[in-house]
Amino acid sequence: MKKRKLLDLNEAVQHPGKHITFDVSTKLEEVEDLDLVEPLTGTLDAVSTGNVLLLSGSFQTRAVQECSRCLSPVEASIKFDVAEEFPIGGTPGGYGSGHYAEVSADEPSSMFEDNSLLFEELLRQVLWLNLPVRPLCGEQCPGLTARAETTDEGRPEFAALAELLDNREGCGK
């Protein structure tokens, strides 16, 4: 099992108002259905208000998807921004209280281990939301015209199934 990649945000959580910036580059190797041509790169900024941890940043990559008409590979540049908020529970240590604050959630979060962000999980989710919904290889893409044709007997893809049914009906006679 691979070690999970973490960004330690404890300094920002314990000291409200303090900005921490990370340069991030990842290939998102754990994602099976996504083919990145270039690593996902960008900058992530973290700051706490005392009650909320704010994460923001800008990222870019190049990915290969299928054309929504003809299913040929399409390479596209993808740029997106991250703007997320996570609640903080407890009293930040920066207030000199001797207490400890930590990122909390109403439900178990797969984004954090203590005050460390599983940044690949966050980036994976935001990237999926920013992928083109219907990528096209070109505006003039003809689509799957040869496959969509039908004959008088029905769709050609189902010819083998029809033959199996005919053979089955002939066995009982």
Image: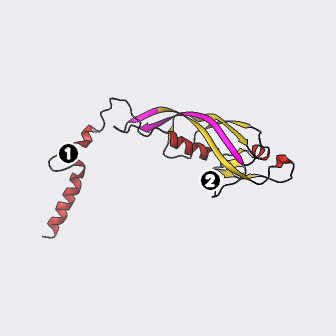
Rendered residue at 20%/45% (across/down): 150
Tell me the residue that label 1 is attached to.
150
Left or right: 140 as drawn, with respect to 53? left
Q: Where is residue 124 in the image (x, y as percent from the top left)?
A: 56, 44
The type of residue carrying mark 2 is Ser
Q: In this view, does 78 lie to the left or right of 85?
A: left
Residue beneath disc 2: 110
**Which is more toward the observer, 82 or 137?**
82
Q: How many labels were placed on the picture?
A: 2
**In the picture shown, does residue 154 fall above or below 142?**
below
The picture places residue 152, in percent across and down from the top left corner, at 14, 48
Q: Picture coordinates of residue 148 (x, y %)?
A: 25, 42
Q: In which quarter of the image is residue 11?
A: top right
Q: Looking at the image, which residue is at 87% across and 48% down? A: 96
Q: Which residue range is magenta in the image? A: 51-75
Image x and y of residue 47, in percent? 72, 41
Q: In this view, does 37 lie above or below 16?
A: above
163 relative to 17 in the view: left or right:
left
Classified by dominant secondary structure, the portion drawn in magenta counts as strand
State the residue at coordinates (31%, 36%).
Answer: 143
Figure quadrant of residue 163? bottom left
Mark-to-mark CA distance, 1 and 2: 48 Å
**Residue at the spot x=20%, y=56% of the render?**
162
Secondary structure, mark 2, is: loop
Q: What residue type is labelled 1?
A: Thr
